[in-house]
Amino acid sequence: MHSDQPARAAWRKSSCSNGRGGCVEVDELRPGAVRDSKDPHGPELVLPAEAWQSFVRAVRSGEFDDI
Protein backbone atom coordinates (compact mmCIF):
# COMPACT_ATOMS: atom_id res chain seq x y z
CA MET A 1 0.00 0.00 0.00
CA HIS A 2 1.29 3.44 -0.89
CA SER A 3 1.72 5.82 2.00
CA ASP A 4 -0.83 8.20 0.45
CA GLN A 5 -3.54 5.53 0.48
CA PRO A 6 -5.84 5.26 3.50
CA ALA A 7 -5.48 2.38 5.93
CA ARG A 8 -9.18 1.51 5.59
CA ALA A 9 -10.86 0.93 2.29
CA ALA A 10 -13.71 -1.20 0.99
CA TRP A 11 -12.79 -1.84 -2.63
CA ARG A 12 -15.45 -3.35 -4.88
CA LYS A 13 -14.96 -4.29 -8.51
CA SER A 14 -17.23 -2.32 -10.78
CA SER A 15 -20.02 -4.16 -12.56
CA CYS A 16 -18.87 -2.26 -15.65
CA SER A 17 -15.47 -4.00 -15.64
CA ASN A 18 -14.88 -6.24 -18.61
CA GLY A 19 -12.55 -8.99 -19.79
CA ARG A 20 -10.77 -6.68 -22.24
CA GLY A 21 -8.63 -4.98 -19.63
CA GLY A 22 -11.20 -2.54 -18.25
CA CYS A 23 -11.00 -3.45 -14.59
CA VAL A 24 -12.03 -0.71 -12.20
CA GLU A 25 -12.60 -0.87 -8.46
CA VAL A 26 -14.43 1.73 -6.39
CA ASP A 27 -13.96 2.37 -2.69
CA GLU A 28 -17.34 2.19 -0.99
CA LEU A 29 -15.99 4.17 1.99
CA ARG A 30 -14.83 7.08 -0.17
CA PRO A 31 -17.14 7.95 -3.08
CA GLY A 32 -15.02 9.11 -5.99
CA ALA A 33 -12.02 6.90 -5.16
CA VAL A 34 -11.19 4.49 -8.00
CA ARG A 35 -8.25 2.30 -8.94
CA ASP A 36 -7.16 -0.29 -11.49
CA SER A 37 -8.04 -3.68 -10.02
CA LYS A 38 -5.08 -5.24 -11.86
CA ASP A 39 -2.74 -3.03 -9.79
CA PRO A 40 -4.23 -2.95 -6.26
CA HIS A 41 -1.08 -1.44 -4.78
CA GLY A 42 -0.79 1.19 -7.47
CA PRO A 43 -2.15 4.71 -7.51
CA GLU A 44 -5.77 5.58 -7.04
CA LEU A 45 -7.76 8.46 -8.43
CA VAL A 46 -9.96 10.43 -6.04
CA LEU A 47 -12.49 12.71 -7.69
CA PRO A 48 -14.57 15.44 -6.04
CA ALA A 49 -18.16 14.29 -5.37
CA GLU A 50 -19.68 16.38 -8.20
CA ALA A 51 -17.19 15.07 -10.75
CA TRP A 52 -17.77 11.48 -9.63
CA GLN A 53 -21.55 11.88 -9.90
CA SER A 54 -21.18 13.35 -13.38
CA PHE A 55 -18.96 10.45 -14.45
CA VAL A 56 -21.42 7.85 -13.08
CA ARG A 57 -24.31 9.54 -14.92
CA ALA A 58 -22.31 9.48 -18.17
CA VAL A 59 -21.49 5.77 -17.76
CA ARG A 60 -25.12 4.91 -17.01
CA SER A 61 -26.33 6.87 -20.04
CA GLY A 62 -23.96 4.93 -22.32
CA GLU A 63 -21.76 7.91 -23.18
CA PHE A 64 -18.62 5.73 -23.16
CA ASP A 65 -20.04 2.60 -24.77
CA ASP A 66 -18.24 3.18 -28.08
CA ILE A 67 -14.84 3.78 -26.52
Image (tube, rainbow, N blue to C red):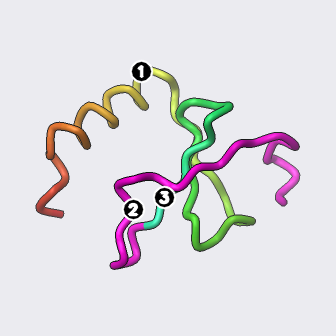
The image position of residue 54, as x and y in percent, is 31, 28
Numbered circle sitting on residue 24: 3
Q: Quadrant of the N terminus?
A: bottom right
Asked if 20 appears above or below 44 in the picture, the reply is: below
Q: Quadrant of the C terminus?
A: bottom left
- Rendered residue at 59%/40% (across/down): 33
What SS does tag 3 mark?
strand
Q: Quadrant of residue 30?
A: top right
Q: Quadrant of residue 21?
A: bottom left
Asked if 51 appears above or below 35 in the picture, the reply is: above
Q: How many marks on residues?
A: 3
User: Which residue type does callout 3 highlight?
Assistant: Val
Q: CA distance from mark 1 to mark 2?
A: 22 Å
User: Which residue type does callout 1 highlight?
Assistant: Glu
The image position of residue 45, as x and y in percent, is 57, 47
Q: Which residues are magenta?
A: 1-22
- Rendered residue at 45%/52% (across/down): 14
For label 1, the residue is 50
For label 2, the residue is 17
